[in-house]
Image (cartoon, rainbow, N blue to C red):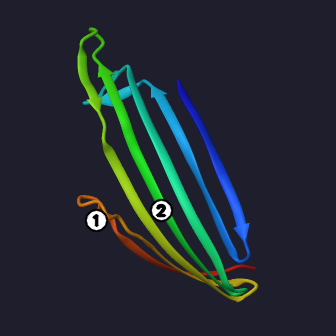
Amino acid sequence: KFSRIGFDVDAWYGNLNLFGGAWFAINKGPFTLEEQIYPAEFKSNTFFVQADYVIYPWLIGSLRWEKFKANHLSVWRQQGFELAQGFGGDDITRFVPHISVLFRANVKLVLEAALFPNGEWKKNNRFGLTLAVSF
């Protein structure tokens, strides 16, 4: 069983588009640990805020902030005693700067980075360059 609830907001002011959303989740079992399946409960939430700005019709800049938080994990053995309780505080924060250059109606160049300010997550920083051609 799992439950999800979320919402989003979206607003334009001239060439600036501000939007964001939130998502709250509860998962109830099963959980696999050491090749065994246990009943479990996991709670988490995710938030993001993004600003897109149309600099020119062919040049669009964007900045997104994202946060994931694992609030709670409980796992019980089938015999009924607790294996793990209260796991949480696993916060993952990420900034995503992005720029799109539209050369023609069907040719786009995208520069994007995913930057993690958290200490242990910094090793996951990545940078990307994409050239998309559509027919």
Q: CA distance from mark 2 to mark 1?
A: 15 Å
**Disc 1 residue crowd, few under 14, some 14–19, many 20+, Cα 10 Å:** few
Q: Quadrant of the C terminus?
A: bottom right
SS state under label 1: helix
What residue do we see at 45% from left, 77% from top?
128
Residue 13 is tagged as none
The amino acid on which the numbered mark 2 sits, given as a three-letter code, is Trp
| Crowdedness near tag 2: few (<14), some (14–19) or many (≥20) residues, C-alpha within 10 Å | some
- Closer to us: mark 2 or mark 1? 2
Report helix, strand or loop for mark 2: strand
- Pointer 2 residue: 65
Query: Cβ–Cβ below 8 Å for labels 2 and 1?
Result: no
The residue lying at 63 percent from left, 60 percent from top is 19
Q: Amino acid at mark 1?
A: Lys
Q: Position of residue 43 (x, y in %)?
A: 43, 32
- Horizontal and vertical percent position of residue 101: 62, 86
Above or below residue 90? Residue 13 is below
Image vertical order of residue 48 relative to residue 95, above or below: above
Task: Report the residue marked by disc 1.
Answer: 122
